[in-house]
Image: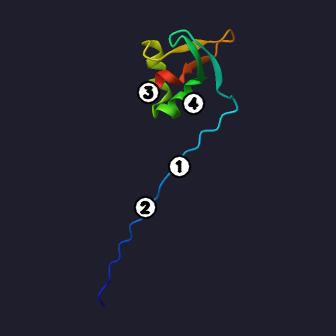
């Protein structure tokens, strides 16, 4: 008996939706010298296509604009992500 070999290739696209209970906020960015959309590091990572760790490294190196709220929440300026 002769065996017949069949190969099947499957392709799929993956879409990731980031849902956060915290909304982005408009706040004064002192570097932009204007009101800007400020987001959490997690949201900034999704927007920029980076890891949260990479966003935090950019904050520490002052490569992105950011502010810290009185409660200690870090917010990143969306204008500085590009």
The CA distance from mark 2 to mark 3 is 31 Å
Name the mark nearer the viewer: 2 or 4: 4
Tell me: residue 5, above or below residue 52: below
The Cα–Cα distance between marks 2 and 4, rounded to whole angstroms, is 28 Å
- State how far apart marks 1 and 3 are (Cα): 22 Å
Between residue 76 and residue 73, name the one nearer to us. 76
Which residue position holds label 3?
A: 82
Q: Mark 4 — residue?
A: 43
Residues at circles 1 and 4 in contact by the CB criterion of under 8 Å:
no
| Residue named by callout 1 | 15
Helix, strand or loop for disc 4: helix
The percent coordinates of residue 62 (x first, y second) are 44, 12
Residue 68: x %, y % from top left: 61, 12
Placement of 55 over or under 60, stated as above or below? below
Name the mark nearer the viewer: 3 or 4. Answer: 3
Which disc number belongs to residue 35? none
Residue at image location 46% in from the left, 34% down from the top: 49
Scheme of image coloration: rainbow
Q: Are marks 2 and 3 in contact (CB under 8 Å)?
A: no
Residue extending furthest toward the front: 34
Of the image marks 2 and 3, the number of the one nearer the N terminus: 2
Residue pictured at 43% horizontal, 61% vertical: 11
Mark 2 element type: loop
Q: Distance between the residues labelled 2 and 1?
A: 13 Å
């Amino acid at each position: 008996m002769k065996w017949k070999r069949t190969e099947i290739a499957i392709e799929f696209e993956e879409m990731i939706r980031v849902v956060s209970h915290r909304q982005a906020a408009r706040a004064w960015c002192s570097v932009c010298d204007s009101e800007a959309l400020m987001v959490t590091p997690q949201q900034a990572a999704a927007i920029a296509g980076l890891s949260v760790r990479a966003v935090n490294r950019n904050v520490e190196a002052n490569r992105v604009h950011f502010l810290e709220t009185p409660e200690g929440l870090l917010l990143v300026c969306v204008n500085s992500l590009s």
